[in-house]
């Protein structure tokens, strides 16, 4: 049974803001397992041992089967739940968010905390970027030097990512493309190069592609 595409975060990233003198730092990361999520949390906790709170949420599994969150000392329902609600709204899984707070001396109230931790989660997700996991094929193809310009021009219009380019007696390109787009790509390549370039399929992987706007 083929894995259905699902959304996740593209990379680790962070962002921050100040709310009524409290500093909020939102961290996000793609993770594959609960163990990876907890390891990410441990890293942020160690980095911010002096923080007032390190609140978090994570969702694991293509079907969002595991959901965990913590208020880490904030009033119940004002931190972890708003963080995970943002993840659910963005429909991302296999990801973890930690929102670190340095208290600035001004109480925010329950509503203020909910808004602040929601914002902390949202800016972390935006910093990481959202991608969609698709079955993806990796190809290599050899290109004679005189044909490089023509092939590179062709690739600009194709839904492929050039992963690597090696210069030997020929140029060896490593490409990745969504599995559903392979047939059209190969047919177009054959026409564009008069059948002189034959890509070789190396493997199939699962990879996050940037979310289409």
Image (cartoon, helix red, strand yellow):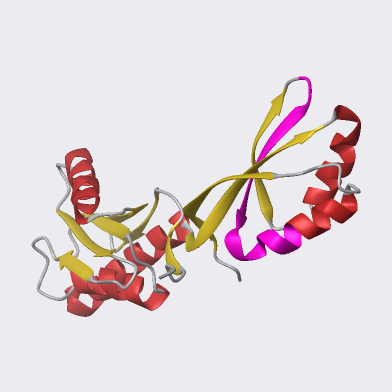
The residue that appears at 48% across and 51% down in the rendered structure is 205
Question: Which residue sits at x=10%, y=74%?
Answer: 76
Rendered position, 189 above or below 211: above
Question: Vertically, is 189 above or below 202?
Answer: below
The quadrant of the picture occupied by the C terminus is bottom right
* Percent coordinates x, y for residue 1 in the rendering: 40, 70
Residues 138 and 124: in front is 138
Q: Is residue 171 magenta?
A: yes
Give me the residue at 12% from left, 66% from top: 74
> Residue 106, image x and y in percent?
19, 64
Residue 182 lies in what quarter of the image?
bottom right
- Would residue 207 be found to the left or right of residue 56 on screen? right
Range of residues picked out in magenta = 169-185
Tag count:
0
Q: Nearer the viewer, residue 176 or 39?
A: 176
In the drawing, does residue 160 fall left or right of residue 76? right
Q: Position of residue 164 (x, y in %)?
A: 64, 35
């Amino acid at each position: 049974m083929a894995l259905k595409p699902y959304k996740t975060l593209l990379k680790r990233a962070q962002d921050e803001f100040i709310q009524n003198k409290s500093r909020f730092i939102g961290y996000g990361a793609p993770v594959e397992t609960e163990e990876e999520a907890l390891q990410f949390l441990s890293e942020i906790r160690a980095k911010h041992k002096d923080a007032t709170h390190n609140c978090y949420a994570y969702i694991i599994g293509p079907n969002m089967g595991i959901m965990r969150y913590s208020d880490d000392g904030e009033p119940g329902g004002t931190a972890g739940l708003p963080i995970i609600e943002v993840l659910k709204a963005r429909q991302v899984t296999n990801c973890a968010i930690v929102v670190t707070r340095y208290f600035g001396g001004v109480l925010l109230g329950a509503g203020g905390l909910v808004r602040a931790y929601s914002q902390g989660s949202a800016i972390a997700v935006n910093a990481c970027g959202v991608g969609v996991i698709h079955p993806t094929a990796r190809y290599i193809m050899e290109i004679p030097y005189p044909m490089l310009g023509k092939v590179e021009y062709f690739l600009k219009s194709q839904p492929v990512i050039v992963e690597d380019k090696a210069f030997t007696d020929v140029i060896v390109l490593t490409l990745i493309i969504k599995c559903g787009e392979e047939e059209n790509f190969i047919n177009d390549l054959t026409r564009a190069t008069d059948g002189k370039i034959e890509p070789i399929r190396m493997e199939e992987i699962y990879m996050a592609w940037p979310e289409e706007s």
